[in-house]
Image (tube, coloured by chain):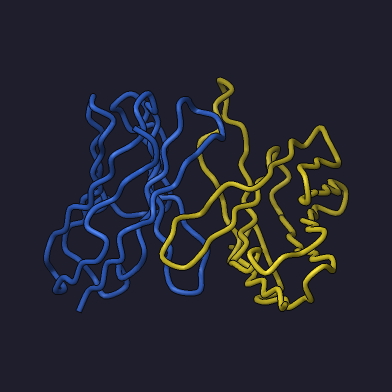
Chain colours: A yellow, B blue
């Protein structure tokens, strides 16, 4: 049961253009969402996150949008740079009783290639 | 000390054997989680330790076990290895039980 889905295995964009990576989820208990970037032979690196009480969070070139009614989030990268080429994972968590979030549920990832 | 260090980086084991993977977390990170990433998949949660006690577990059988030590290091033990256990094993630590996870580079386990 894939609770977090990234339906595009790969995405190719030109340098300077916008990259839009999409993620859908099915578990309505998820209340926190994260994007991670992963280069080969490295662990995932945290990129940006958003709480379910917000619909947008921005950090420099990276913006995450959350549409709770559609159970959909997206990551926008503007402008895209060749160094952004990596696998991007969407992850979600649901707050446990006691206030501690502990488990991340990941999608399968999207390979972003930014061409010079 | 910064970063999360995992050892070994690569490992080949035979089906039925036992393996221990190690993780050294950042100082002060009292929460550690382990994830399994099979080829073409996202990381799957195995379990989490907080202050040396297991406080959450994913859909993995009991032959997957762990330990966390007071010096911010931890271990993942897998008994009776199966071919499907071949994967990248990731350790992630955080200073609390929130979302500030730092991942290590992983251990690539191959079971033959």
Quarter of the rendering occupied by the N terminus of chain A: bottom right
Quarter of the rendering occupied by the C terminus of chain A: bottom right
Residue A107 sits above or below residue A35 on the image: below
Q: Position of residue A26 (x, y in %)?
A: 71, 55
Query: In this orientation, which residue lies closer to the viewer: B97 or A83?
Result: A83
Q: Position of residue B102 (x, y in %)?
A: 47, 41
Picture residue at 24% right of the left edge, 70% below the top = B82
Picture residue at 74% right of the left edge, 59% below the top = A24
Query: In this orientation, which residue lies closer to the viewer: A82 or B92?
Result: A82
Q: Residue A107 falls in which quadrant of the image? A: bottom right
Q: Position of residue A52 (x, y in %)?
A: 77, 37
Q: Residue B107 falls in which quadrant of the image? A: bottom left
Picture residue at 23% right of the left edge, 44% below the top = B75
Query: In this orientation, which residue lies closer to the viewer: A109 or A77?
Result: A77
Please give left or right for residue A8 compared with residue A68 in the image: left
Residue A28 sits above or below residue B10 on the image: above
Please give left or right for residue A50 compared with residue A78 in the image: left
Q: Residue furthest top?
A: A98
Q: Position of residue A34 (x, y in %)?
A: 65, 46
Picture residue at 80% right of the left edge, 57% below the top = A76
């Amino acid at each position: 049961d894939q609770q977090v889905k990234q339906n595009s295995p790969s995405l190719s964009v030109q340098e300077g253009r916008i990259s839009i990576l999409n993620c859908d989820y099915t578990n309505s208990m998820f209340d926190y969402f994260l994007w991670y970037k992963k280069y080969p032979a490295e662990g995932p690196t945290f990129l940006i996150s958003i709480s379910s009480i917000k619909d947008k969070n921005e950090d420099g070139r990276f913006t995450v949008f959350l549409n709770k009614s559609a159970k959909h989030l997206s990551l926008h990268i503007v402008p895209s740079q060749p160094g952004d080429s990596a696998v991007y994972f969407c992850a979600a968590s649901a707050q446990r009783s006691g206030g501690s979030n502990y488990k991340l549920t990941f999608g399968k990832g999207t390979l972003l290639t930014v061409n010079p | 000390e910064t970063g999360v260090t995992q050892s070994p980086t690569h490992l080949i084991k035979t089906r039925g054997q036992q393996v221990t993977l190690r993780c050294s977390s950042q100082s002060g990170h009292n929460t550690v989680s382990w994830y399994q990433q099979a080829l073409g998949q996202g990381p799957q949660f195995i379990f989490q330790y907080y202050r040396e006690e297991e406080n959450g577990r994913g859909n993995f059988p009991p032959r997957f076990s762990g330990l966390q030590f007071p010096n911010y290091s931890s271990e993942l033990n897998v008994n009776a290895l199966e071919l499907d256990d071949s994967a990248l094993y990731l350790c992630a630590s955080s200073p609390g039980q929130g979302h500030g996870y730092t991942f290590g580079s992983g251990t690539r386990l191959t079971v033959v």
